[in-house]
């Protein structure tokens, strides 16, 4: 019996096959006209109103929302559906049942529907990688194959072309309103809502760097941030919620996107306002409480989105630290509970939200960012733990996230395992594991060896001797390579050495990771890529290996003992840095726009300048 992905709820196979005729008589309601493109990939057909048609689409109000029922006999195929999405998902299942060799379908009856209402993916297009439209269309096709229904392109800074702020995107390559509309149409045909997304409280660094907007900042001159044992000064990133200009500015940004978004939800984010209460709002936060000041500002944004007929999505990190304000949340919003580490307490949070009758969505992550290759353990744990709590406490669904912190140095195929896991568990809410992901990933990449290589590399962080929340130990070499051109190299060297001295990768851990990298590299290097996409994926895997290898080597250079040959290791590390600096732009441009590349490249360039002086 050929498996269906994601798993179907009920399937009863019968003997025999439906042999597809040379020209299929298709009974297709006008309301399903958008299925025509998909149908042409399955059948050569002509439309008919004849009740004896070969393929029937039959509306049935008794079927679950987004669900379907398929009946295949030796004489016909009948598809029962309640809504457009259900009919589209039925075609995804038919495509998997099709025996292309004999052009036939097995006789069977299938009943299926999703376990989660919202089954989504959020892609960061703001730090620093903006995918091309063709890349995004290919991503949407992959999501559709998993019967996912929600996509967000995360916007902060200048990754969207704002009509109200002409010239603000100078030097960038943003998504335009017209491109958003075209992409929304492409997604909609595939039963996916392209949900509008705009951050507007924290994460405002790019705006506040500009003189004309800096006055709206909570701390215009930046703020101190404690990172472990280190105290670092960060640039202004948070709006002053008490300044009326802040509210009007965010409304203006929202108004540039809202009219183009047809989805029922809109994500206003409002996460990580790090400076809140440290600057201009300090007195108000002390008198009223940080939570109250936060909710007062966010509630106005929620109301603005509600006036456009949409429900606002809001990240829950601030609210979870101030549970006393949860009962005061506006009705027109949904709480997004995000967590990216294996021990994140989704169950605890979602129980509290359920008890307070707060609508919520669970948000695990691909864990691809700040790791090069993803952190497989954390990806699987957050996905499964979030899904379990969503089911247990009546959550609305799941949106898995894929961020691009510190140059967006991970390549897209390394985000696929997390996307696949979310797609599988969103439709059929049962725990997922690597064995379930592997065949889907192999199909997406057209290569089992590539899929196995990516999954193996996603486990390298488990070989590290130190667990780091939200990133890998190897990534520290990139994370603390100061990219500021004004800072002297000796100061950058001091900071990196001091950081890595406090975050030592042991020789045993280094050796284990290098063995893993060598094994995967030998396998991938032996493959012969015949298609352009194969060549690209092969190059992305080898480049990822180089990134991990040079980052581990940098840690060893700083923390070496007498058994390490300094000259040889340093020469090899510099050579690897030269390789990634040379190849990163080439690989970037094959999937992404030019804007942001220089910023992304500044990270390995900064590291090279330091390593040369170690």
Image: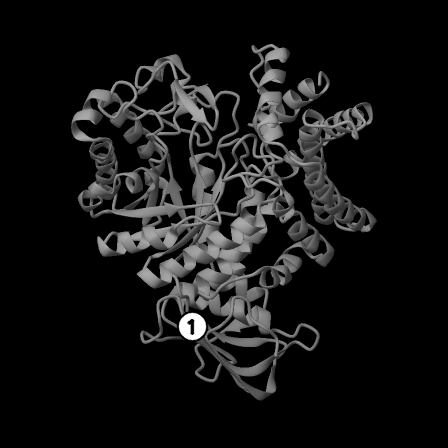
Visible residue check, residue 513: yes
Q: Residue furthest bottom?
A: 15
Residue 536 image position (x, y, % from top left): 71, 43
The quadrant in which residue 603 appears is top right
Viewport quadrant of the C terminus: top right
Q: Residues within 10 Å of mark 1 (few under 14, many from 20)?
A: many
Q: Along the horizontal axis of the image, is 424 left or right of 391?
A: right
Query: Which residue is at 46% across, 23% downward?
Result: 169
Q: How many marks?
A: 1
Q: Is residue 471 above or below residue 100?
A: above
Q: Is residue 419 above or below residue 135?
A: below
| Residue at the image position 31 percent from the left and 33 percent from the top | 255
Q: From the viewer's side, name the closer residue of 598 and 381.
A: 381
- Image position, residue 410 (x, y; %): 60, 39
Left or right of 204? Residue 353 is left
Which residue is at a point 59% across and 81% down the rendered structure image?
Answer: 106
Q: Nearer the viewer, residue 136 or 341?
A: 341
Question: What residue does disc 1 label?
Answer: 68
Q: Position of residue 584 (x, y in %)?
A: 68, 32
């Amino acid at each position: 019996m050929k498996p269906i992905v994601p798993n179907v709820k009920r399937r009863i196979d019968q003997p025999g096959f439906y042999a597809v005729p040379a020209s299929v008589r298709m009974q297709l309601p006008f309301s399903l006209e958008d299925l025509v493109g998909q149908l042409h990939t399955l059948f050569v057909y002509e439309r008919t109103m004849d009740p004896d048609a070969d393929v029937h689409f039959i509306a049935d109000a008794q079927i679950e929302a987004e669900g379907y029922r398929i009946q295949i006999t030796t004489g016909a195929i009948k598809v029962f559906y309640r809504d457009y999405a259900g009919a589209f998902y039925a075609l995804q299942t038919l495509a998997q049942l099709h025996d292309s060799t004999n052009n036939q379908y097995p006789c069977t009856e299938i009943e299926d529907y999703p376990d989660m209402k919202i089954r989504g993916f959020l892609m960061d297009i703001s730090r620093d990688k903006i995918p091309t439209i063709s890349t995004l269309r290919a991503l949407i096709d992959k999501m559709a194959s998993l019967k996912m229904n929600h996509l967000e392109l995360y916007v902060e800074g200048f990754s969207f072309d704002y009509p109200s702020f002409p010239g603000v995107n100078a030097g960038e390559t943003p998504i335009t309103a017209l491109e958003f509309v075209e992409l929304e149409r492409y997604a909609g045909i595939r039963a996916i809502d392209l949900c509008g997304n705009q951050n507007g409280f924290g994460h405002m660094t790019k705006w506040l760097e500009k003189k004309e907007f800096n006055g709206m900042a909570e701390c215009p001159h930046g703020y101190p941030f404690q990172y472990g044992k280190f105290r670092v000064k960060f640039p202004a990133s948070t709006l002053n919620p008490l300044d009326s200009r802040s509210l009007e500015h965010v409304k203006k940004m929202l108004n540039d996107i809202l009219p183009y978004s047809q989805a029922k939800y809109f994500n206003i984010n409002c996460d990580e306002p790090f400076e809140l209460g440290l600057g201009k709002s300090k007195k108000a936060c002390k008198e009223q409480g940080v939570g109250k000041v936060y909710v007062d500002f966010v509630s106005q944004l929620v109301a603005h989105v509600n006036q456009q007929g949409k429900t606002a999505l809001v990240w829950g990190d601030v609210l979870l630290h101030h549970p006393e304000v949860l009962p005061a949340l506006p009705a027109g919003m949904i709480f997004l509970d995000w967590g990216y580490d294996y021990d994140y307490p989704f169950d605890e949070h979602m129980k509290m939200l359920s008890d307070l009758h707060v609508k919520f969505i669970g948000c695990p992550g691909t864990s691809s960012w700040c790791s090069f290759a993803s952190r497989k353990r954390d990806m699987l744990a957050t996905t499964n733990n979030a899904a379990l709590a969503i089911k247990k406490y009546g959550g609305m669904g799941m949106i898995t996230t894929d961020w691009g912190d510190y140059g967006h140095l991970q390549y897209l195929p390394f985000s696929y395992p997390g996307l696949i896991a979310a797609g599988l568990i969103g439709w059929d809410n049962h725990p997922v594991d690597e064995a379930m992901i592997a065949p889907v990933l192999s199909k997406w990449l057209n290569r089992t060896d590539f899929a196995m290589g990516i999954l193996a590399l996603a486990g390298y962080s488990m070989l590290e001797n130190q667990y780091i929340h939200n990133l890998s130990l190897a990534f520290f070499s990139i994370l603390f390579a100061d990219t500021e051109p004004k800072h002297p190299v000796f100061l950058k060297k001091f900071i990196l050495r001091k950081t890595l001295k406090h975050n030592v990768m042991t020789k045993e851990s280094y050796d284990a990771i290098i063995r893993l990298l060598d094994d995967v590299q030998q396998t991938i290097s032996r493959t012969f890529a015949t298609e352009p996409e194969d060549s690209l994926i092969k190059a992305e895997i080898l480049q990822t290996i180089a990134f991990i290898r040079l980052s581990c080597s940098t840690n060893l250079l700083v923390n070496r003992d007498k058994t390490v040959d300094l000259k040889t290791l340093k020469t090899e590390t510099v050579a690897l840095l030269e390789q990634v600096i040379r190849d990163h732009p080439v690989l970037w441009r094959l999937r992404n726009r030019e804007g942001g590349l220089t910023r992304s490249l500044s990270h390995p360039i900064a590291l090279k300048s330091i390593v040369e002086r170690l």
